Image (cartoon, rainbow, N blue to C red):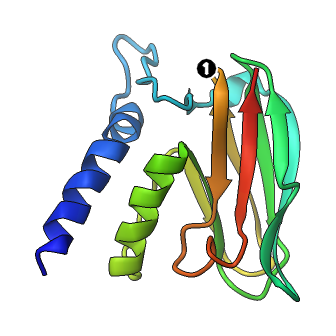
Amino acid sequence: MRAFPMILAAMAVALAPTSMAWADPGHAGHDHAVETAYGRLGDPAKGGRVVQVVMKEIDSGMAFAPERIEVAKGEQVQFVLRNGGELDHELVIGTVEANWVHAEAMAAHPEMAHEDPNAKRLGPKTSGVLRWQFTQAGTFEYACLIPGHREAGMVGTVVVK
């Protein structure tokens, strides 16, 4: 039971910047999204490069296709997501560390629902769009944090140059 408060506290610290970016509507009609180590919520009015991502179950586990993408620093990406599988899947963008903290919280509380700006959850055979602007250079990841899915192989890499 003592681990639960620690997990919640760690998750709150890791996800606080994205929560503030989502909650702050800006001032005088301007969006002042808070930066995270891996970027910020994309602007729907600005479009951006389209990257198709398929989420699926495979014989050896679960996977994203593609497993790796490269983007330029400052580039906005429209992830066009398609769940081709029979199970719910999600794509969560973050640092490896932030995603592990989030995954641990999800494992402890699998019924936990969330609407984070850096994530999109899809039911079987459905599609959706996630817009994200990568404002920092580095190597980040996208992962499915539904318990067991990451461990089954649902993790991809984003290299920002």
Quadrant of the rendering where the N terminus is positioned: bottom left
Q: Helix, strand, or loop for circle 1?
A: loop
Residue corresponding to mark 1: 135
Q: Quadrant of residue 113?
A: bottom left
Is 55 placed above or below 12 here?
A: below
Q: Amino acid at mark 1?
A: Thr
Q: Residue at x 65, y 21 (%)?
A: 137
On the rendered structure, is 31 left or right of 90? left
Residue 5 spot, x, y in % from top left: 14, 66
Q: Residue at x 41, y 78 (%)?
A: 107
> Residue 46, how many percent across, how many down?
73, 21
Residue 113 shows up from this direction: no
Rendered position, 51 above or below 48: below
Q: Residue at x 62, y 30 (%)?
A: 42
Residue 55 figure quarter? bottom right
Res. 46 in view: yes
Q: Tell which of 102 and 89 is nearer to you.
A: 102
Q: Front-most of 4 and 112?
A: 4
Residue 94 on image: x %, y %: 55, 44
Relative to 65, say whether 106 is above or below.
below
